[in-house]
Amino acid sequence: MRRSRLKHTHLNYFQFLLRCLKILRRYGLSSKKMQSKLDKYLEILNPHGIRPTFSIPGGVLNNHSEVVEKYSTKGVEFAVHGNRHIDYSGLSYHDSLRDLKEAVTRFEKNSIFSSGFRFPYLKYGNECMAALRELPFKWDSSHTILWEVMEAGKFHPIKLKNYENMLNQYEYSSSSSYLSLPRYDGGLLEIPVSLPDDDLLERLGLTGTNAVGEIWIRVLEHSYTRGELFNLQLHPERIFIFKDVLASIIDRLRGLVPGIWVCQAGDIWKWWEEKRGFDVKVNCIGHGEYGVEVQCSSRGTFLVRSEVVQNNRFYGGFAIQKERRFNLKSSKVPMIGIPKDSPPKLASFLLNEGFIFEQNEYKGQYSLYLDHFSKFSEEDELRALKIIHESKSPLMRFWRWPDECQSALCITGDIDALTLIDYFKNLT
């Protein structure tokens, strides 16, 4: 028993030393080393017109305001990453609120205005989340979704254990039961982060282009097929390790039809707000025909599923309808009906997904009537979509993403520190 404990102690000490060496390689006494990494990041993205979203603690921003301003003018979007890089999940509401207010003040004092937030370590609790909602943020990107693309048998058991230990620190949802989509929660738009990210893959000892590239390309393909968001997290401190992987992902975007919307996190919030103002008017003309008037911006993608409309097939058997006024043949009202006493979360889900629906007790008059849910949670969303897609009934919806794109890609990362001094200050 004593020998086992001694071996475990030596292993922990060895891992600690490795961690210290990595930190020394990543940061310098000045910000020059990190700036070279930020420059490399932009060097990969800029030729393609892609801009990243980086979150940074208020304290780090305050110490290096000129550096943050420099990259802000280059198109980098900065989000608030707390005031210090600490675990907020254990803080009380009042301690969280005080710390978060200080972060906002530091951003404003340095004229870096941010609408978004991400909790350090992607960890949060009810108390700190309640505090976050008291502040003028529009979006948060702290919830995590694990894409089920890993083949565990390929990895060494010790490295796999390190990976699983770190993964268990997150309160993640699985892509097998959860949609990787933005959704409003108490007025705040939650933009989920995709896992595995660079932190997790490093725990597996993966630094080669081929191994990491295969995993992230698989996530990209899965999210594209499902029409969802791939919110790729790649910390700038690791850009020289994963630069070829990032380039290969960008290369993979080429030639996809429909395309992928590549955006910053703040763009997603702006789009979701724009989409909330869309509307549709449906009038029965008679003889199984309905007049439809679509009210949306030029970026909106309106989809129709009908036996008559056969061309330009899109996600879920729908077709893109470019005309904003048209007639649609259908034996029933070509929309989804739900009971008046349906769970509020069902209506919120349909609204977030852009489906045209009504709450009405006249079940027989709608193309599809969803009375399958006495309760509704996020785990029911995939089941609801399956019912909708398998029905083949005439339906209409606004698509999730703008400009006829099938899915979305957002490239994000955290700047936890710019110097060694920043890093060790976060520990106090």
Image (cartoon, rainbow, N blue to C red):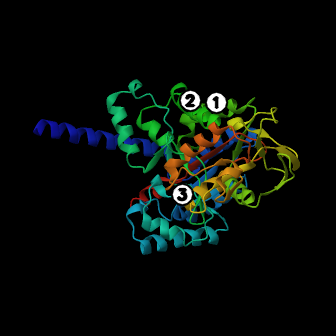
Kind of residue indicated by mark 2: Gly
Relative image position of residue 264 (x, y in whole percent): 67, 50
Relative image position of residue 305 (x, y in whole percent): 75, 40
Q: Could you tell me how many numbered marks the image carries?
A: 3
Relative image position of residue 181 (x, y in whole percent): 60, 48
> Mark 3 sits on what residue?
118
The crowding category of the residue bearing disc 3, from other C-alpha atoms within 10 Å (few below 14, some 14 to 19, many at least 20), is many
Q: Quadrant of residue 283?
A: bottom right
Kind of residue indicated by mark 1: Ser
Q: CA distance from mark 1 to mark 3?
A: 26 Å
**First in residue order: circle 2 vs circle 3:** 3
Q: Nearer the viewer, residue 383 or 198?
A: 383
Residue at screen point 54% across, 73% down: 134
Which secondary structure, mark 3? loop
The crowding category of the residue bearing disc 2, from other C-alpha atoms within 10 Å (few below 14, some 14 to 19, many at least 20), is many
356 shown above or below 408? below
For the question of whether residue 355 can be seen, the reply is no
Q: CA distance from mark 1 to mark 2?
A: 7 Å
- Do residues under tags 1 and 2 come within 8 Å of each other at their CB atoms? yes
Which image quarter is the N terminus in?
top left
> Mark 1 sits on what residue?
248
**First in residue order: circle 1 vs circle 2:** 2
Which secondary structure, mark 2? helix
Q: Residue furthest left?
A: 1
Q: Nearer the viewer, residue 68 or 114?
A: 114
